[in-house]
Image (cartoon, helix red, strand yellow):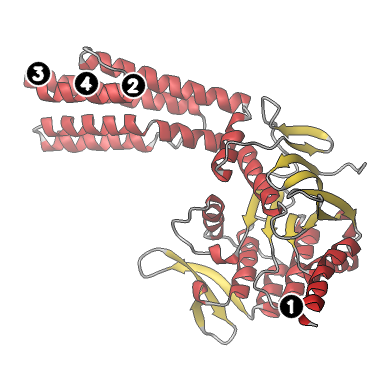
Amino acid sequence: MNKTANIRVNTEGFRAINKADILIDGITLVAGENGCGKSTISKLLYFLYKTVSNYDNLVKKKLYSNLQDVLRFLDIIQQEITFSISDRKLRDEFRKEVGELRRSLRKTEFLEDELTNWINLVSKIEYLYLETDRKSQKTNVSKSVRLKFIVRDILKIEGTDDDISASFVKIKELINSKFKQSIGKIKSRPTSLFIEELKNVFSDAKLPKKFEISEYDDLIVSIEKTNLSIPFSIQNAIYIDTPMMIGVEDAHNEHWEDLNEILLRKGFANNELDKIISSDIIQGDIDVEEGIYSTEEFKFRRKDGEVFNLLDVATGVKSFSILQLLIKNGVLNDKTLLIIDEPESNLHPQWIIEYARIIVLLNKELGVKFFLASHNPDMVSAIRYIAEKQETLDNVNFYLANKIEGKFVYDYQYLNKDIDPIFKSFNIAIDRINLYGV
């Protein structure tokens, strides 16, 4: 396969995948039987691009998680200071001042600035705590002992006879250390963060034997490389594995939460594809409005004026609703990779063709890149021939997962534009009908 592509994915030796060398230029469709590793590739792609595209935010999220005990410690100190101040006006002023400092912590774009805010906050609370203790002329031994135990827990040390002032110094050293580590990660972008994501997603310590992403033949990601490069061709990825995820709360699937967050965004992109879905297919419109409990809800407004909660409508309508909301929100562009597992799922044959049409038009009009995992002949045919009519077939690539004889692993065969091998694999179903029905 000697072709320079926007993106080339090369992976080996992971779960059901023996070898897969896949191009993503516009629309890539992989076909194969259940359990051949299609969804594994989808997840690898999604979490890779989620990591490399949002590296700074992921590092910050981990940093804040590591500092939660420190924040609780500051809350405890702040409460004790407040209780020690008899002047109500002074108490209110103190609460306001510390509150403003804490609200400013995550408003800064750069961690270096945020580190300064954290240290200033701790120094402020330290000063006020020591000052109120001095004015009250009390040692308050019980509180002092409790705070020492809290500090020991935060610093992960067995014991300390430090006074509270020395404890504040160590807390600031801890904060400084955590921030410096995170700043270093953002600058060097170590691959270890992506490897951590893989282990969390697949609940398996075993990594792919090989996993590489090349952009215009330049290797930008590899689990063998020390650092992750910044991608250009794809800058955000969206993963849809079922339309039933829409509106689901407290999902255990991270990509469901990510997608729902995107769908709830307010957007006003004016695009003809939105009108095609609304007028030609689902005969209605999807929007987001505030519910009775001040939570946002997805609504389907049918052409006849009837309004339904989107959670209560047909699954096929949900499938198109997700695409419509993504179009409305303006999040789809030529730097987007939209990953869809079994897009034909729960769709009437006529709507399978309509869905394929929207995919082809999104690629043509907005430049959206697609990775599709399918085992439906109508979807495969529709992508192939609609793309040809729209003069975008050069951007379409087909693959078939072939099982290695005597093993439970698959090699992914590059078919270019030839879908006949996929249909030969589908003919197994006809053979089974003849076997069991005749």
Residue at 40% from the left image edge and 69% from the top image edge: 291
Residue 128 visible here: no
Q: CA distance from mark 3 to mark 4?
A: 14 Å
Q: Return the disc, 2 or 3, that comes first in the chain's sequence.
A: 3
Q: CA distance from mark 2 to mark 3?
A: 23 Å
Residue at 32% from the left image edge and 36% from the top image edge: 100
Residue at 75% from the left image edge and 48% from the top image edge: 409
Q: Return the disc, 1 or 4, that comes first in the chain's sequence.
A: 4
Q: Return the disc, 3 or 4, that comes first in the chain's sequence.
A: 3
Residue 215 to residue 287: above or below: above
In the structure shown, which secondary structural element does the residue marked by tag 4 occupy? Answer: helix
Amino acid found under the numbered disc labelled 4: Lys
Label number found at residue 155:
2
Label number found at residue 349:
1
Amino acid found under the numbered disc labelled 1: Pro
209 or 142, which is in the foreground? Answer: 209
In the structure shown, which secondary structural element does the residue marked by tag 2 occupy? Answer: helix
According to the image, label 3 marks what residue?
139
According to the image, label 4 marks what residue?
148
